[in-house]
Amino acid sequence: MMRAPMTDPHVQIDSLVKTYAGALKPSVDNVGFSLPRGEMLALLGPSGCGKTTILRMIAGLIAPTSGAILINGRDVSSVPVYKRNMGMVFQAYALFPHMTVAENISFGLEMRGIGKAETVTRVRKALDLVKLSGLGERRVGQISGGQQQRAAIARSLVIEPELLLLDEPLSNLDAKLRDEMRDEIRDIQERAGVTTIFVTHDQDEALSMADRLAVLSQGRLEQIGTPREIFDRPQTDFVASFIGAGNIVIGNVVEPGVADIQGLGRLKFVGGGRVGGPVKLMVRPHRFVLADAASDGINHFPGVVEHILYRGEIVTLTARSGEAVLRADLPTHAGKLPERGSRVTLAVAPEDVTLIGDGSQ
């Protein structure tokens, strides 16, 4: 299990386990991570990996089998949900359709016995924060999906929560609105300064919104780190394949920083690897560039284009080089682009080759 070292974390999840009655294995298996105050963490992984179960355990909706959930150093694992002071936004928003937007936002304050004057003030500030000023008297059915999302967030923030939890916050929106709401949610979170954890299976959402990503697979934490660390330096096969596309190759280290890849040739990389031992390396498709066909430099691989896919800003091609098939994403503005059947030379800088492991698995 991998952890991010941190002093005085706001949130500390320690060896969390959840095993449902009758299950053969845990849904959440010994997961631990930390999060500083004010940061946003994405729990990322495929369906069934345990990310929503973790979120619901943090919220108090599900009791953990073992482990601890600490907020500001206090274990809240056994604290009832209504005493945890956490705001949660569900996939379907769970707004009351018979109430106005303002009434929905004020609901949590009324349940806490907050006075009318303070409630009015806090609701107005919450509406301003999520850019819904002037829409407080509208019914839920009279506002758009994106506005409903912001209203649900305002309802969670108005209680001034210790922690904001978002469960697949963009799943109910169309593609264009999802892109807009990514920036909106991130902007709201930063302006509110609230520590936030959100669940998603969408790597683009996680990479673009979060300060840190916790990547999960089959109930276990594969890796936690910044978006750049996760994308550029994956530490396991699963992370390398789940986060973006990658050309993953296995070879033997013939000298420090140089591996002999079967069917491809010599590949130079930076750091790691035991001379004489196996090694597993990855090159992201966008790290390849087209090189002069006559060149014979470091990490230059001549080949023939087998497939090419035009994708607007980029073209994705696969080229056979020796016995290997390499995938490359090339910008469409880079002059004349190759065609199917044409010869190309793909090149990659040694520092853009990622060491994943020793290749023994």
Image (cartoon, rainbow, N blue to C red):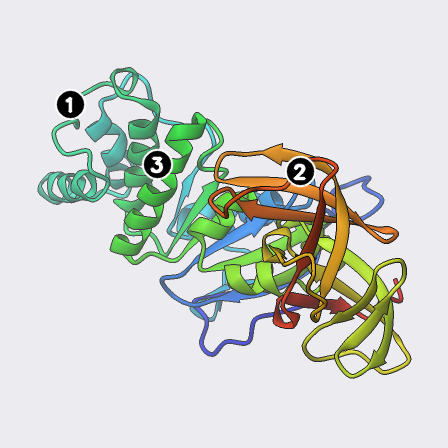
**Which label's residue is closer to the chain start, 1 or 3?**
1
Q: Where's residue 200, x and y in %?
A: 54, 42
Above or below residue 317? Residue 207 is: below
Q: Residue 47 bears which disc, if any?
A: 2
Q: Where's residue 327, x and y in %?
A: 70, 47
Q: Nearer the viewer, mark 2 or mark 1?
A: 2
Circle 1 crowding by C-alpha within 10 Å: few under 14, some 14–19, many from 20: few
Type of amino acid at the residue the image marks with label 2:
Ser
Tell me the CA gap for discs 1 and 3.
24 Å
Type of amino acid at the residue the image marks with label 1:
Glu
Tell me the CA gap for discs 3 and 2.
24 Å
**Which label's residue is closer to the chain start, 2 or 1?**
2
Above or below residue 78? Residue 82 is: above
**Which label's residue is closer to the chain start, 3 or 2?**
2
Q: Quadrant of residue 152?
A: top left
Q: Using the rendered image of the protein, determine whether residue 11 is visible from the camera's viewpoint.
A: yes
Judge from the rendering whether residue 250 lies leftward or rightward of residue 328; answer left or right.
right
Q: Nearer the viewer, mark 3 or mark 2?
A: 3
Q: Quadrant of residue 281?
A: bottom right
Q: Where's residue 289, x and y in %?
A: 60, 56
Q: Residue at x 12, y 45 (%)?
A: 118
Q: Using the rendered image of the protein, determine whether residue 17 is visible from the camera's viewpoint.
A: no
Judge from the rendering whether residue 141 lies leftward or rightward of residue 308; answer left or right.
left
User: In front here: 255 or 101?
Assistant: 255
Q: Residue 180 bears which disc, if any?
A: 3
Kindly identify which residue carries mark 1.
Answer: 137
